[in-house]
Image (tube, rainbow, N blue to C red):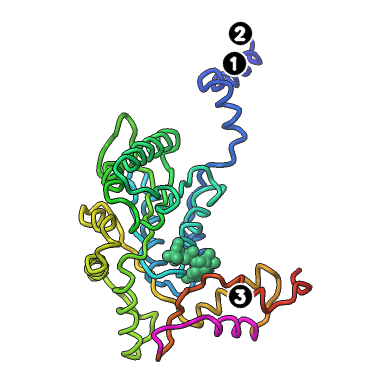
Amino acid sequence: MKSVEIFVLFLLLPIVETGVFDFFSGLFDNDKLLPFDSEEFKKDLRKSLYGQHIASKKILKAVSGFMKDPNPPKPLVLSLHGPSGVGKTYVTKIIARNIYQMGQESKHVHTFSATYHFPHKKQMESAMYESQLKQWIHGNVSSFPHSMFIFDETEKMNPQLIESIKPFLDYMPHIDGVSFRKAIFIFLSNAGQNGIINFALDFWKKGKVREEIQINTEEMEMLVYEHILIEKSSGDSQSCLLYQHLVDHIIPFLPLELRHVQACVLAEMSSLNVIDLDVAHTVAKEMSYYPPEEKIFSVRGCKSIRQKLMLHIDERDII
Ligand SMILES: Nc1ncnc2c1ncn2[C@@H]1O[C@H](COP(=O)(O)OP(=O)(O)OP(=O)(O)O)[C@@H](O)[C@H]1O
Ligand SMILES: [Mg+2]
């Protein structure tokens, strides 16, 4: 055989092995994993996420350690807790854009919202959700092991639904021939928020600098557990997960202060190419703050900032 023929054969071999369609779609697939760069991830968190030093640090360590491990013993399971509008959903976008070429738009990122995807609580519908969810997770991980599953409003999920996906989160080498050890599961919830808020408030009352709030894992777990139990009606699903020790990291999100809201307004302004510090301050001041007397924390965090901002800027200023 001539060397040219051998060369052509060499080129064709992968096509024959993988199938023509798979080979060509693989060539043009731009929805793959990025080479994980923990320094870039760190910079992105520092630049984009305001006022969440505990969450930033924990997420950086947890995700970087997991992504660098060629053979993790189990999937990564994170549980993010805190009040509304403080960056829980937002940080999942930051994680996704540091893992997948297409970031949050990647077909490997699957987001479920309890009230939208699992609205019915009756026995029959719950059984249907369970089997569909299991199939969805199993199918996607079997075709892409590094798939990410985000569960929003976890506190509103039927505990049985969480129970049904527990095997996927555990130290199971295989389930029906599929390994889940490279998958990422992120649960978002407001459960336990009162514990976190009281903790931050006490700290503020003692006149300490917020950035000095350091809390070890056991302390935070106890804080979140205790309040989930107090907020019992909303915490069933969450406690079912936590108590089974399937969550690797419980991550607290602190309530945001005026200066963080101001930073959010400036970020919105910069995306519109209009920067005006006075307007940023005015918009941040217009948000409501609690407790009623001290007015330290923003009631809605950084939610609806853009809508508020639009009331203050002239459309002609937007470039
Ligand atoms: N800590 C933060 N740093 C930077 N931007 C933030 C932060 N928190 C919130 N934002 C901005 O506010 C928007 C709303 O926040 P996000 O959706 O993450 O809130 P959440 O914590 O998920 O609230 P909820 O519990 O109501 O779902 C984000 O898209 C982001 O633009
Ligand atoms: Mg959210």
Residue 30, x across and y down, in percent: 59, 41
From the viewer's perspective, is 89 left or right of 30? Answer: left
Kindly identify which residue carries mark 2: 1
**Under tag 2, what secondary structure?**
loop
The label nearer to you, 3 versus 1, is 3
Which range of residues does the magenta coloring cover?
278-292
Where in the image, quadrant-wise, is ligand 2 located?
A: bottom left
Q: Quadrant of the C terminus?
A: bottom right
Disc 3 CB within 8 Å of nearest ligand 1 atom: no
Residue 239: percent from the left, percent from the top?
A: 24, 58
In the depicted structure, whether residue 23 falls above or below residue 213:
above
**Among the two numbered marks 3 and 1 on one chain, the one whose residue lies closer to the N terminus:** 1
Percent from the top left, x then y, of residue 261? 52, 77
N-terminal of the two: label 2 or label 1?
A: 2
Does the rendering let one see residue 315? Answer: yes
Q: CA distance from mark 2 to mark 1?
A: 10 Å
Quick one: 63 or 162, which is closer to the camera? 162
Disc 2 + disc 1, Cβ < 8 Å? yes
Q: Are marks 3 and 1 in contact (CB under 8 Å)?
A: no
Q: Which residue corresponds to mark 3?
A: 308
Q: Which image quadrant: the N terminus?
A: top right
Three-letter code for the amino acid on which mark 3 is drawn: Lys
Instruction: Point out which mark residue 87 bears.
Output: none
Comparing marks 3 and 2, which lies closer to the viewer? 3
